Amino acid sequence: MGDPWERFKKIDEFRGLQYRLEPDYKNPLLDIPNAVKQRIRQRLGFLYGTEQVEEIYSQVERIMKIHHAHATKEILEAEQNFDPTQRFTERDIVLITYGDLILSEGRSPLRTLVDFAEAFFQGIITTLHILPFYPYSSDRGFSVISYAEVDPHLGTWDEIAELASSFKLMFDGVFNHVSSKNRLFQKFLDGTPGFEDYFITFESREAISEEELQHIFRPRTSPLLTEFYTINGPRYVWTTFSADQIDLNYRDPQVLYKVLGILLYYVRRGADLIRLDAVTYIWHEAGTSCANLQQTHEVVKLIRDILDVSAPHAAVITETNVPHSENIAYFGNGSDEAQMVYNFALPPLVLHTFQTGTATVLSRWVADLRTPSDMTCFFNFLDSHDGIGLMGARGILSEKEIEDMCDRVEAHGGFVSVKDNGDGTQSPYELNTTWFSALNKEDSGEPVAVQIDRFVASRAISLVLKGVPGIYMLSLDGSKNDPDAVHRDHSKRSISRGSTLEKDIIEMFGNPDSLGSRIMKQHGNLLEKRVREPAFHPNGEQQVFDLDPRVFALLRIAPGRNSLVLSLINVTKQKVTLNIPLVRSGLQGNPLRDILTDRIFEPDGDPWQFTLAPYEVVWLKGEGKDSKMPA
């Protein structure tokens, strides 16, 4: 039968390839097509004005040429063979983790992650998103002290390189802000020439009027301006997220040069995806919301242009926790902005589905879900290091439904973080909880088997939906809320950021009766079966079937229309009997197999009556030659 992974080999050509540590200018310099040069000039002109375009463009081109001079012959050949339409496939699953979520005695956290990932994840997980592993001063890595270093408490670049030899890697581009301890900010405080405009500063708090403040979109309740003392006296500095996170000023081209240099440095260090953290807020314009501005989109498009020429295998993923209609705008026209966008509406919609026992809202939303091209896809995650964002559900769920969701999470021991609306009011912004605890109440008296089935059924939705699934490490085995960490760290987000000893994880896996082991068995089966099914390719089609409000039914069709899977997920603890339309789903005339259990079914009519057990997940596939793709 040949190699079943033959068609994926070109995708993995970059595994094990490393850039030169120093540039080699003996080889030909980067040849930038004239059309790309003109496009970059136009973007720079929009951002900085036509008078500075040539000067700024020359610096941008210089940065690109320096990066190119680090590339080996093997890397350049792999880039020439790269097919962007096959950047992501059904094999792709992203694991989201901090560098120190797994600890061991006698080894650095990153060394432990290397050993653990190679032992347990190869063949299932293709990509590791290692959350910021740089030296930091707060916010668990997102207040970056030094962009180009690995936090010595975690390990070294050598461990990152080892991970890059086995997995695709996602790095965080924390390009909206720096730590107050970052040397760039220290240079500003010292009055170093050239750093006067690196940050957004004012001589008084009153420099921004109350009316302007009401327009500014804030994901926090902390003051927008923070006072710092500089060599030139006190200054009030723009701090979107916290007093320790100083917003960069992209109006200064020097900031752009610095960020582009870091971006390409990350590629040379093994990044296949660059996650643009908090990119929503990178451009500030008086009298506007300072969120999702056209200038922001132009910066993202500029980054895409530069990567397409300098490192075409590296992709942009935008992290924009905003309402869905604004979020999907970061796809651009399908070829000029982010290749992947966080699907922020998905987590609250799936949670609402399982809290209420009805898939109606989720099914209606998925039926209209689109991406603009086969070079773009959603990043389908359910939870992350930040918990569960709520902004993506605005306009889809009512305020009452969001309020009820928050109440249920708090009843399960979680927390709700709020944002400042600018008018003196606040509203829910994110839920701080693990996914397992959001679905299951600790003292409910409910059988553990039911809780596990509910958890796994919910995870299945992100696996069948068109796009690439992302799994936070703590949801692999159903970790519960850690309230002690919240009190210890004085941070609600710590509830889902706890580390575990490697030996304890291995012991848990070895105990078939443990909660984590039981979840891993069922969850792992979903993952193993998903990565072998072409119908789950991100470029495949999907159709929602309205069979029963209690069931999420989704038909997935492979890009070549040579394979299809009907996924049925019962979102309730009730048995549900369905009437499945065989002809309309393309499953007529054949025995059907549930690829999760290998059970064979012989339908006795159309529609076919089929019963789902509580929280059951079934992936039906035709076993004979008579399957016909639905029109």
Image (cartoon, grey):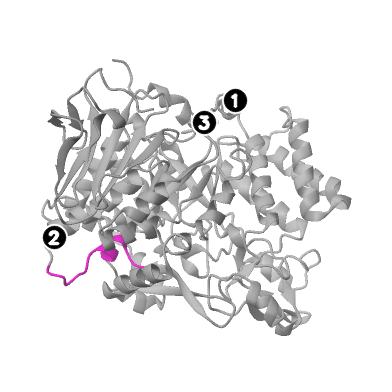
N-terminal label among 3 and 1: 1
Query: Do residues under tags 2 and 1 come within 8 Å of each other at their CB atoms?
Result: no
Q: Position of residue 572 (x, y in %)?
A: 21, 56
Looking at the rendered structure, the secondary structure element under dot 3 is helix
Q: Give 446 or 474, whichever is nearer the viewer.
A: 446
Question: Does 276 sit above or below residue 332?
Answer: below
Find residue 180 and report its horizontal and vertical position in percent. 61, 72
Q: Residue at x 31, y 60 (%)?
A: 435
User: Is residue 392 rendered to the left or right of residue 253?
Assistant: left
Judge from the rendering whether residue 180 lies leftward or rightward of residue 8; answer left or right: right
- Per the image, the residue denoted by label 2 is 448
- Mark before the other along the chain sequence, 2 or 1: 1
Q: Position of residue 521 (x, y in %)?
A: 19, 46
What residue would you read off at disc 1? 80
Quarter of the figure with the N terminus: top left
Q: Nearer the viewer, residue 15 or 619?
A: 619
Q: Badge 3, how many Cα within 10 Å: few under 14, some, many 20+?
A: few
Q: Which mark is residue 85?
A: 3
Give how far apart the Cα atoms at labels 2 and 3 are: 42 Å
245 to 535, vertically: above or below: below
